[in-house]
Image (cartoon, rainbow, N blue to C red):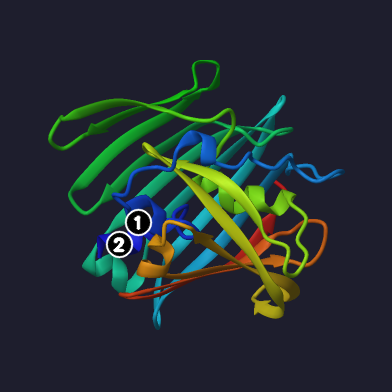
Amino acid sequence: MRAITQTIFCALAFAPLAYTQQPSPALASLPQLPSPRAGYSFPQNQTLTYSVDWRVFSAGTAVIHFEAIGDREKLSANADTAGAINLLFHASDQFQSTFDRAKGCTYEFDKQTVEGRRKVNSTLKMDYPQSKSILDEKNLVTGQSKHVESPIPSCMTDLLTGVFYASSQPMEIGHDFVMPVVDAMHNVPVTMKIEGREVIKTTLGTFKTIRVQPTADAGVVKNRGNIWIWYTDDDRRLPVQMRAKLFWGTITFRLIGNDNK
């Protein structure tokens, strides 16, 4: 059941990447993070709420909050299991990311995970002047700590931000784009395949969307399952639905709340 909560929330789009044990590609082979398209601005203050279903069960909720702080954007996510899933395995995870509003470069990615008896806090900081990431992790149950430093390129996004940073990119059918994504000590190029248009219905209404599939050249997405994100076909590029078809079942996120607060 831990795999379910690993998918909730930020790992939905790139969940399989987080589990690979393959070495990261050479820094020189990683693409540059594309800048936001002209005229695009990240939300000043916005809260998105998603229902989360696993197969036919309600698995929980996920809440995303955007907050502009000067030239940086703070992105927070909270995910909690609910219903029958909660009876089998309780989880309550929190994620925070801070990134540059103009360039998209992640500065820090924090995780606080409570999954059954497992409680782990981790902080991943990007030291771009020194070309390295710094991971500090502590298991609150065992007391064990880990400190690891790893080389990084000049600008990267992270697992949480990547889902929403993609909204800043032009989306034309058949014109894919690639983002360098960092998770723990892995640097992975993720291709966002712009597949087609589709109409999606949620409790908020009916949306014309663009369907995007994140993939990785390393093959881990192929081995683990398939992931799609449906962005509104307008200037907002709001992710109204996200789905991961994995070997243990299908997880679907549907937007049920959108508040400017």
Camera-side residue of 77 and 123: 123
Seen in the image, is 227 located left or right of residue 200?
left
Q: Disc 2 to disc 1, how far (Cα)? A: 5 Å
The picture places residue 232, in percent across and down from the top left corner, at: 74, 66
**Residue pushed farthest bottom?**
56
The picture places residue 132, in percent across and down from the top left corner, at: 45, 23
Per the image, label 2 sits on a secondary structure element best described as helix
Q: Where 250 falls versus 18 (above or below)?
A: below
Q: Where 246 falls versus 22 (above or below)?
A: below
| Amino acid type for the residue under numbered disc 2 | Ala
**Residue pushed farthest right?**
39
Seen in the image, is 88 located left or right of residue 243?
left
Residue found at x 34% / y 34% = 122
Residue found at x 36% / y 68% = 223
Camera-side residue of 2 and 15: 15
Q: Judge whether residue 8 can be spotted in this image.
A: no
Q: Are marks 2 and 1 in contact (CB under 8 Å)?
A: yes
The residue that label 1 is drawn on is 6
How crowded is the residue under tag 2: few (<14 C-alpha within 10 Å), some, or many (20+)? few
Residue found at x 72% / y 24% = 70
Residue 42 is labelled as: none
- Which quadrant, please, contains the C terminus? top right
Per the image, label 1 sits on a secondary structure element best described as helix
Q: In which quarter of the image is residue 94?
A: top left
The picture places residue 260, in percent across and down from the top left corner, at: 73, 49
